[in-house]
Image (spheres, helix red, strand yellow):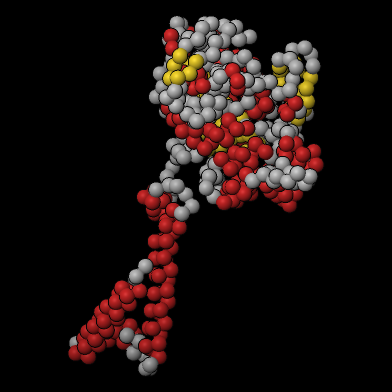
Amino acid sequence: MLIKRWVILFLLSMTLCSLALAMGLAWAYRTIDFPSSLTGFVQTVTLQFIAHPYREFILLGGGVAVLWFSVWKLGRAVLGPLMALSTTDRGLAQIVAEHRFGPAPTEMNIVTIGGGTGLSNLLRGLKLENLNLTAIVTVADDGGSTGRIRSEFDIPAPGDIRNCITALADDESLVNQLFQYRFKADGSTLNGHSFGNLFITALAQVTGSFERAVIESAKVLAIRGRVLPSTLENVDLYAELIDGTVIQGESSIAHKTAPIKRVFLGPDNPPGYQPALGAILNADLIILGPGSLYTSVLPNLMVAGITESIRWSGGTVVYVCNVATQEGETDHFGAADHVRAVVEHVGEHVIDYVLINSNPASIAAIGPDLGVEPVIPEDLHRIGRDIKIVTRDVVSDRNPLRHDPTKLTAALLEIARGEVVDESQQWRGDLPSDLDLHRSRSATVPTSTGERGTLVSFGANRE
């Protein structure tokens, strides 16, 4: 860095200044007649009672100790923010301010409830804001690596929790990439396992507690927020179909042969995780979804205490509607159908807002070859009058089946800050022509990439 020459010059200048000061003090001591009342004090301060050269050694030792302490503190004060800059995407000014005055107070307490890709995608946007963030995650997954671990170690599902922990961590960190690594070796017992799932499982065995394993995993990745299971019980998800068939296991629900009538947990009414209930009660904004309706969002609401805490909380409750249906789970569902399913579990007068994607270009990008349908602002007159409707462009420009984390975060914070206009009257009346897709017709609109696309014609009846 070419600074040694300047450090040497600085030390030389300090030495010269010190010598000049010492000479001046020596001259003053020899030539100035101090009053008799001060003579004893001056002799004590100048260490006259200690013989040469011991008094010089004492001063030198004290000077070296003070010099070492000052250099150590100076190094921490200067290098601390610079070292923190290498592990975060925050600006240097913000880091220096936090280093000097402590962390800035968060704007609000936000709780997200869900699981799967939808919730982790949302967290990637929320973590960039100054928020006190808590993610409450379902533990009913039984597929893939998670299912094998649950059956062998009898612990709650770690998969969705792992996804949320990594979503709240630094995306570029090597540890984060390690947690997301999945073994691929045909014939190996590790094939298909995620390292993060194995890590959480190992911690649960070492600490004797799944709760402790989740906490320590979050510390390892230094996440921005908290990730909490909705319950510590090892629960299974069941689905009762309209033909009376009961399916066990989240991974089996997508392969059902008839529409879902209801879902429930086994054992029934598992106790809610107390820190999760406390976070809900203290939340300024509670977000339900996005994510698989029957396998990610609703399982959390069937945990004892979760729905009650939402009702008792003074925070604003927002349900984020998916941008597309999920094959085998919510086939032919519209926005009103999604809201209806949630209301059946949390009850009336609990949800304050429903957020629905309104980008017609993204709607056009979901073609029939994808096997799913866009969830659009239609039939909204069937949504309860106490629920306010907000429509925004919240879809990803790259993937029409996913929300864009930045767009979704902006829309949610707009609601939390009370900056939105209730669109209920508009959507419960006549729909704008560019989104009036419930009529059997086709229309050509620009896609998100600037190309032309054809909107798929859907029937009016979603039920």
Residue sitting nearer the eye, 210 or 143: 143
Give the answer, above or below, for where 209 lies relative to 371.
below
* Total count of labels: 0
Q: Image height check: is 435 above or below 324? A: above
Residue at x-position 64% and y-position 18%: 330
Q: The C terminus is located in which quarter?
A: top right
What percent of the width, then of the height, locates residue 58? 40, 85
From the viewer's side, name the closer residue of 201 and 146.
146
Res. 71 image quadrant: bottom left
Residue that protrudes farthest toward the bottom in the picture: 52
In the rendered image, the quadrant that contains the N terminus is bottom left
- Give x and y (percent) for residue 207: 72, 50
Compared to residue 431, the image places residue 93 above or below, namely below
Rendering coords of residue 377 (x, y %): 50, 14
On the picture, is 118 further left or further right than 256?
left
Q: Is residue 437 above or below residue 50?
A: above
Q: Residue at x 70, y 45 (%)?
A: 184
Q: Front-most of 425 and 30?
A: 425
